[in-house]
Amino acid sequence: MTVSVKNTSDEELMEKGELLPIVEDFYTIQGEGYHTGKAAYFIRIGGCDVGCSWCDSKVSWNPDVHPLVSTNDVIKRASEYPAKAVVVTGGEPLMYNLDYLCRGLKDKDIQTFIETSGSHPFSGEWDWVCLSPKKQSPPLEEFYSKADELKVIIMNEEDLQWAEENAEKVNHDCLLYLQPEWSHFKTIIPVLVDYVKQHPKWLISLQSHKFMRIP
Ligand code: SF4
């Protein structure tokens, strides 16, 4: 079911998480972080108020231009692929209550992974939380203890300080990734290589899907 007009009942269904503004959902390979190289179904939810200058998903920012889609339909599509893993991303997916989505995925024995800036309240049941903190809209404190992976996007050397400030707050077993911002890749990757050699608690994450030219 795709709904183009938002009315009171749509808003109620959105509050329950039974309707979500979906930018796109598709089967691909995770390109970043710990799950790099694994097949997964991606659900990109519309809406983000974080405003990163280098965002490569600006099309997702305004939720009103994306159709409201039945969460059950998305779950059904996700369940039709061989990899029983879903990556929920955005936008900032936690602008919405994701309890309903996660329950439906879990009912189908699908693993749930989320990519979030942590700037909105936590919801859902997740097998993997990738926290990607942004300076202009920092994570709520509750996210630091929930993160399985901290992924900090590095555009310049000053961002390394931000990365360290966040690394001090996560659990000791949280994986730590520095990821070069794509449009500054050539200038920043040598900095990251040197930095990780000196600070080996960090790993480098590359946006390998962009090298593979897949979504
Ligand atoms: Fe883009 Fe993510 Fe930043 Fe939102 S939080 S502006 S979707 S990079």
Image: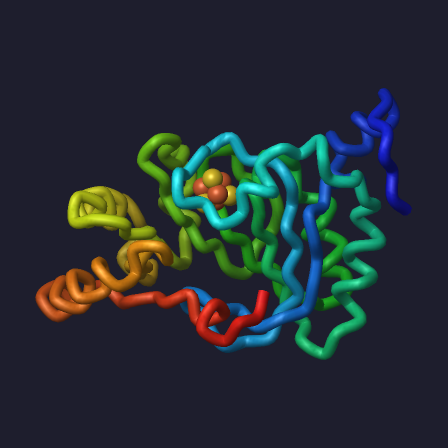
Q: Is residue 158 left or right of residue 119?
A: left
Let me know if residue 141 appears in the view. no
The relative height of residue 60 versus residue 73 in the rendered view (above or below) is: above
Q: Position of residue 180 (x, y in %)?
A: 31, 59
The residue sitting at the left extreme is 198
Horizontal and vertical percent position of residue 138? 36, 34
Q: Nearer the viewer, residue 16 or 20?
A: 20
Rendered residue at 16%/61% (across/down):
191
What residue is shown at x 64% (from left), y 36% (from top)?
96
Q: Say left or right for 164 vs 72.
A: left
Q: Return the residue found at the far top.
A: 8
- Which of these two is toward me, 136 or 102? 136
Q: In which image quadrant can residue 127 be found?
A: bottom right
Q: Quadrant of the C terminus?
A: bottom right
Nearer-the-camera pick, 119 or 68: 68
Find residue 38 and report its image quarter. bottom right
Residue shown at 29% from the left, 55% from the top: 184
